[in-house]
Image: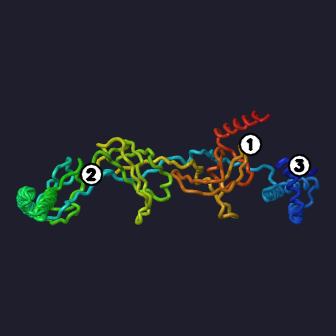
Amino acid sequence: MTKSRMLITAALGQTRFQAALIQLQKGALVCAYAKRRADLWRSSIFGDRPLSSIVNVRDKFLACLLLPLAMFFLGCTPPDRQPHQIVRPVKVVRISDDTAAGVMSFAGEVRARYETILAFRVSGKMIHRLVEVGDRVHKGQCLARLDSNDYRLGTDALNAQLKSAQAEQDFARDDLTRYRELLNLRVISPAEFDRHDTAYITARERVAALNAQLSQATNQLQYTDLLADRDGVVTALEAEIGQVVAAGQPVVKLARLDEKEIHIDIPEQRVAGIALHQTVNVTLWADGNRRITARIREIAAAADPASRTYRVKATVLEGQDEARLGKTATVWIPLTTPPRIAVPLSAVFTPQNEPGRPRVWLVDEGTGTVRSVPVQLGEALDGERIVVSGVRSGQLVVSAGVQRLAEGQSVRVPEQVAVAMQGSVAESKEDQP
């Protein structure tokens, strides 16, 4: 072996020198050109010096010339001929069933379960209004009053007619008694007696009809006073003093305070996750983070035609005094849907050759390598996570650096995860017979 080869072998090592020598053989023209230039340079500089000294200088020159060439050709070797593969450090996440667990929150308003619109049962001009918005009233309390003069006059007229009919009834009854005695004495004919009997019956029935009319007129007179039918609070007024209102026109809105509820609107894609009679938590915006218990009482059967949302009502079970009507509330509803598999958004990637098929990298805990599996994407969750299908609970998923990995590539996981992986592998080996 020449001295130049010894120098290159010492610098590169036997394996790399052989690889460089193969590349140098392929580049024979480059070596010939370099030798020719070296001979010209030697003759111009050394002249007639001894051959041994010239050879030593030539060997050193060739060593200095071939060393960078060998490094160049080694750098141009294909990646599949590199003896050692790069082990990349990665971040991993272990999939669990509770990654998609949580609650849904919706804003709503405190309302009374029973809210009644009160109105007069007769028409007339309102001359008194005895309550204002926010006043608490009791059952039987007068809220408003109409002008009752016309109804009182009608009652007086019917009362007079009734007295006249009663007088006629009394006369017809006495007259019938006398004619019955004459009939027994055979002084009058039966036909004459029947005529007086009919007159009495007519007078009696007229009294009954006037009694009914007088009762109706008396009721209408009483209807000129609007009375509260239950204990509650006045939430709205629909008429003012001096206004002529019709029968049934809204005048006062009265809400009961014994049972309150929260009204919320749920989007159509969320309504399936709510169950009837489900227990939920409610927080009032004015009371900070204090939570009270409520129960889902009603879920609308059809969506609102304008907003396309479903009205849900939750009955407040505690804190009735704090939950004042009209307060802003937030209803926290636990998810009742089955647990879903969710992974970080950074774990999902799309290959260039398959742009429409998202994938994730799974770590083989036995070999420490990765492989990609296709997944189907679902809805996005809080915390930069997304629901996927195609993987199962307990698997390790690469969550960072997914674009720089290749199939079967060795990876280095964090130390805590590596220790857990070694323990699981050892347990699996012990379980094998």
Of marks 1 and 3, the one in the foreground:
1
In the image: residue 10, left or right of residue 416: right
Between the residue at mark 2 and the residue at mark 3, the CA separation in whole angstroms equals: 104 Å
x and y percent of residue 8 in the render?
Answer: 85, 51
Which of the two labelled residues, at mark 2 and mark 3, occupies the earlier sequence position? Answer: 3
Q: Secondary structure at mark 3?
A: helix
Residue 327 at least partly seen: no
- Residue 6, disc: 3
Of marks 1 and 2, the one in the foreground:
2
Between the residue at mark 1 and the residue at mark 2, the CA separation in whole angstroms equals: 68 Å
Query: Dot 1: few (<14), some (14–19), or many (≥20) neighbours within 10 Å?
Result: few
- Residue 255, disc: 2
> Which residue type carries mark 3?
Met
Choose top left, top right, bottom left or bottom right for residue 193.
bottom left
Disc 1: which residue: 366
Q: Of 291 and 67, which appears nearest the observer? A: 291
Q: Quadrant of the C terminus?
A: top right
> Which residue type carries mark 1?
Gly
x and y percent of residue 354 in the render?
Answer: 69, 63
Which of the two labelled residues, at mark 1 and mark 3, occupies the earlier sequence position? Answer: 3
x and y percent of residue 374 in the render?
Answer: 68, 56
> Which residue type carries mark 2?
Ala
Which of the two labelled residues, at mark 1 and mark 2, occupies the earlier sequence position? Answer: 2
In the image: residue 63, left or right of residue 97: right
